[in-house]
Image: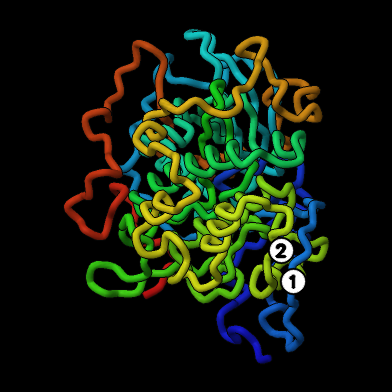
Amino acid sequence: MGSLCDNCFKPEKFQTNLPKNTKNYPRLSGVSSSDTEGSLQLYAERQKLLEEDEEIPSSAPNCSNKTDRTVSQTNSGMTVSQTTLCSSTEKKTKVSIDDFEMLKVIGRGSFGKVLLVRHKETMRLYAMKSLRKENFKEEKDKTNCIIERVILEQLNSNFVVKLHYAFQSLDKAYFVIDYMQGGDLFFHLQKNKRFSVKRVKFYIAECVLALQDLHKKGIIYRDLKLENIMLDCQGHIKLTDFGLCCLSKSKPSVAHDLDEEGSRVMAYSFVGTQEYLSPEVVKGIGYNQSTDWWSLGAIMFEMLSGESPFADKSTSKTLKNICYADVCYKEIYSKKAQKLISRLLERNPKKRLGANQGAIEIMQDPFFKEINWNELKDKNVKPPFAPKNRSECCVKYFSQEFIEEDAEDSFVESSLTVLQKSANHIDRFTYGFNDGFVDPCKSTSYSVIEKSADKSKTFEGIPEMDPDLEQ
């Protein structure tokens, strides 16, 4: 067997900064890890897979050892117009870190941490994610942060976390979002080993609605995994972490690779978490929204069996399994569930369920026969599991490793001068103000629903095409 794609990959195209082992670390979005060793290993293994000539494996061991659940981040040359975000006029009422009481650490990654905080004025609870600017090595790193900021503000979905505030200091950028009391599905699966068919059906159905909302806006999520699926206090899911999203050229509800003019529009960047990468991402042959449906099939398999369908202790074997290995369904007892997973884990992205009519195709699958989609969309369906929190500040569904840490906004030791730090300022990043602040930019706020007069833009001021999209 010859190489899959001899000229698909150029090392200089990728910023392959990955943590070596992120199994217990919720990934912080917008930027990549500063630990390059693990990422280079993953990239090298992927290159080896594309170049070596060896026998194709016949089956995939369903390995439950979730080692090296890593994330890769691409280079992004996308530019963002400074007119897209509201002016950060200096006022005493502008939100800053001093407006929040730090309660608990609920997550940590190489770029910073996530804190449970209370807004001192309103007494409301939020999750605050901080990103260290010292890791913004190039302008594109700031651009990724802004893209997440825009997506969080503009996506109006019952199944996506909402942005409440965004602000920055010389050293950090902060996102203040919904606090999801129920923790993430990775935490719950570790405790339960596997979920019931009823519970999986509910979670996957709400994920379908979440991805539908993203795809309608031309967004490829690219990092669907259990750690990014959070539960609210009632047990409904919301997606979080949009740092790896791709803004595609157009915003079709159907995930085809042709736009209205018949031009081919595909993304090529090596982005995501390795266990959930689709074959087209691994091979570098181009992908679109259909890659998210593959990831949905992988997490559905994991929820039902307690094991990833393709994971192996060896990175190279994991990537080979994704591309070639047969999936073993012996631990999945529902025939309808097996059938749906097999249609989502179709290696030909054009034949994959969801590739032609988007989420509608998946909603019509027999596995979801009992689902009332209108009721589910309005969150009128009772979740099969409701978190039992003693109080609104309860953090029982988060890792003990984090909540035992001191809840504080850590000081960043840096060799950068004040002038160098100022160069990392993110223009017009601020979002949300305390009562009494009049936003001078409110009348010119933008929308992702309405296209601007310039048809080359969907999110106003942001080019539709990801820099890794080619025609």
Where's residue 332, x and y in %? 68, 52
In percent of width and height, residue 11 lies at: 63, 74
Disc 2 packing (10 Å; few <14; some 14–19; many ≥20): some
Relative height, residue 369 to residue 326 (above, below): above
Q: Residue 228, position in %: x, y? A: 59, 41
Instruction: Identify the residue position indicated by label 1 in the image.
Output: 59
The CA span between labels 1 and 2 is 7 Å
The residue under label 1 is which amino acid type? Ser
Amino acid carrying label 2: it is Cys
Indicate the secondary structure of the residue bearing disc 2: loop
Q: Nearer the viewer, residue 380 or 437?
A: 380
Image quadrant occupied by the N terminus: bottom right
In this rendering, position of residue 396 left or right of residue 346: right
Classify residue 409 as left or right of residue 146: right
Q: Pointer 2: what residue? A: 328
- Residue 358, image x, y percentages: 38, 57
**Is residue 414 visible in this depiction of the protein?**
no
Q: What sort of colour scheme is used for the picture?
A: rainbow
Residue 150's disc is none
Residue found 50% across the figure and 61% down from its top: 291
Residue located farthest toward the bottom when viewing the structure as drawn: 2
Extreme residue toward the left, this view = 453
Secondary structure beneath disc 1?
Answer: loop
Q: Which badge, 1 or 2, is on the more N-terminal residue?
A: 1
Relative to 403, say whether 327 is above or below: below
**Above or below, comparing residue 468 to residue 208 in the picture:** below
Q: Are marks 1 and 2 in contact (CB under 8 Å)?
A: yes
